[in-house]
Image (cartoon, grey):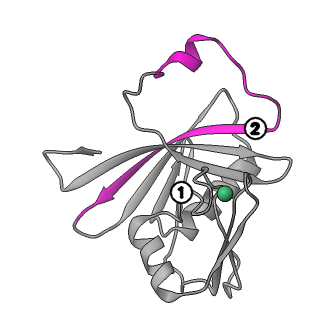
Amino acid sequence: MRRSPFQNTSVTYHRAVFREADGLLYVNRFDRGGACRGWYYATGAALPPGVALASLEITTDEDSGDREVLVRFKFDSDTPAARERITRWARSVGHTRLWFADDYVDLTLLPAPAASVGRCHVCETTFREEGADFHEEVRRTGAHPWTCPVCGAAMAAWEVEDVGFDP
Ligand SMILES: [Zn+2]
């Protein structure tokens, strides 16, 4: 986490991976400076068709709690379906605004959903959370649980249901 000396903000870095075939989105914490930084790019690798990859830079205003997400697609993988799923994810975790290369989306804070559903694609456990406390925590931290409480694997972005609006 980087803290700006000029404003009361902090920045975190993530990667979003979207698979169009089944609509799965993973958002993984991906802080700069890891041992493998640049390795993937240096190999000249390409993404398989139907897979979108984006880096996300999330800036939090510590005073207001607003969170803005800067989305940068990699390898020309920007598609309407990927934008739509990333937008739905950002809304579900309470981010304030999304910036794409040529567009931005204001994410008005809506009533908490009736339930959030997460599925682990490794041990295949499904989690369904209805509590107001759970959704408050999701919005406060900007994330559903990152890892499966059963097996510890990274979890795909959760879906919200019965929201009473078009997510
Ligand atoms: Zn699991």
Please state the horizontal and vertical placement of residue 59, each as a whole percent of the image: 35, 52
The numbered mark at residue 51 is 2
Number of numbered tags placed on the structure image: 2
Disc assigned to residue 8: none
Position of the C terminus, as image quadrant, is bottom right
Q: Residue at x 22, y 67 (%)?
A: 63
Mark 1 or mark 2: whose residue is earlier in sequence:
2
User: Is 126 or 160 nearer to us in this picture?
Assistant: 126
Quadrant location, ligand no. 1: bottom right
Report which residue position mark 1 lands on.
146
Question: Furthest residue to the left?
Answer: 5
Quadrant in the picture for residue 73: top right
Q: Secondary structure at mark 2?
A: strand
User: Residue at position x 27%, y 51% from top?
Assistant: 10
Above or below, 155 against 47 in this view is below
Disc 1 to disc 2, C-alpha distance? 20 Å
Q: Which residues are magenta?
A: 36-62
| Amino acid identity at mark 2 | Val
- Tell whether 50 sits left or right of 103: right
* Left or right: 86, with 111 as reference point: right
